[in-house]
Image (tube, rainbow, N blue to C red):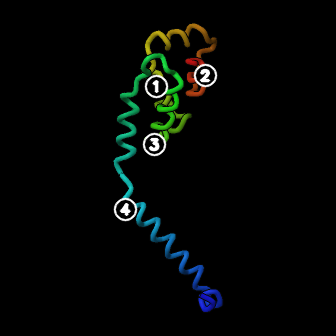
């Protein structure tokens, strides 16, 4: 161990482990995870009036699918999963109508 310290082998050893860890994760990570998350996101619907669970699930799936909050597609998917009556309520109660995901999430609460 002291020999490694004096020759700089500890840093080299740690570098090899970091490379190994990255290669392992790249090889064994579910590459279809983001595809499945996007499919789940497209089919997500708010159930039983539980807006908090819907927002939490939507946010988790959105990140897994690779969407950013600022993307128009994320906002459209969010609105699509809300009950029609809730969409109408947000539209009728806000002037101007929210044009961001965060605005719709706040309006739906």
Dividing the picture into quarters, in which one does residue 52 lie?
A: top right
Frontmost of labels 1 and 3 is: 3
State how many labels appear: 4
Real-space CA distance between mark 2 and mark 1, rounded to the nearest whole angstrom:
15 Å
Q: Marks 3 and 4: CB-CB under 8 Å?
A: no
Q: Earlier in the sequence, mark 1 or mark 3?
A: 3
Question: Who is closer to the viewer here, 72 or 12?
Answer: 12
| Residue placed under numbered mark 4 in the picture | 27
Report the residue that reaches farthest toward the front. Answer: 1
* Rendering coords of residue 53 (x, y %): 50, 27
Binning the other alpha carbons within 10 Å of mark 4 as few (below 14), some (14 to 19) or many (20 upward) gives: few
Q: Which mark is residue 64?
A: 3
Q: Residue 16: percent from the left, percent from the top? A: 50, 76
Q: Position of residue 58 (x, y in %)?
A: 47, 31
Element type at mark 2: helix
In the displayed structure, 57 sits above or below 2; it is above
Q: Indicate which disc, 2 or 4, sits on the residue closer to the N terminus.
A: 4
Instruction: Examine the rendered structure and indicate whether residue 12 appears above or below residue 81.
Output: below
Neighbor class of circle 3 (other Cα within 10 Å; few <14, some 14-19, many 20+) is: some
Q: Quadrant of the N terminus?
A: bottom right
Question: Residue 36: x and y, percent?
Answer: 35, 41
- Name the residue: 62% across, 90% down: 7
Residue behind mark 2? 106
Q: Which residue is mark 1?
A: 76
Determine the CA span between mark 3 and mark 2: 22 Å
CA distance separating discs 3 and 4: 18 Å
Separation (CA) of disc 2 from disc 4: 40 Å
């Amino acid at each position: 161990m002291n020999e490694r310290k004096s020759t700089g082998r500890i840093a080299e050893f740690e570098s090899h482990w970091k490379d190994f860890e990255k290669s392992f994760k790249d090889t064994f990570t579910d590459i279809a995870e983001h595809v499945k998350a996007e499919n789940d996101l497209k089919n997500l619907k708010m159930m039983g009036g539980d807006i908090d669970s819907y927002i939490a699930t939507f946010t988790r799936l959105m990140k897994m699918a690779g969407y950013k909050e600022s993307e128009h597609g994320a906002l459209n998917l969010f609105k699509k999963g809300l009950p029609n009556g809730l969409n109408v309520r947000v539209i009728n109660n806000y002037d101007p109508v929210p044009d961001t995901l965060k605005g719709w999430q706040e309006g739906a609460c």
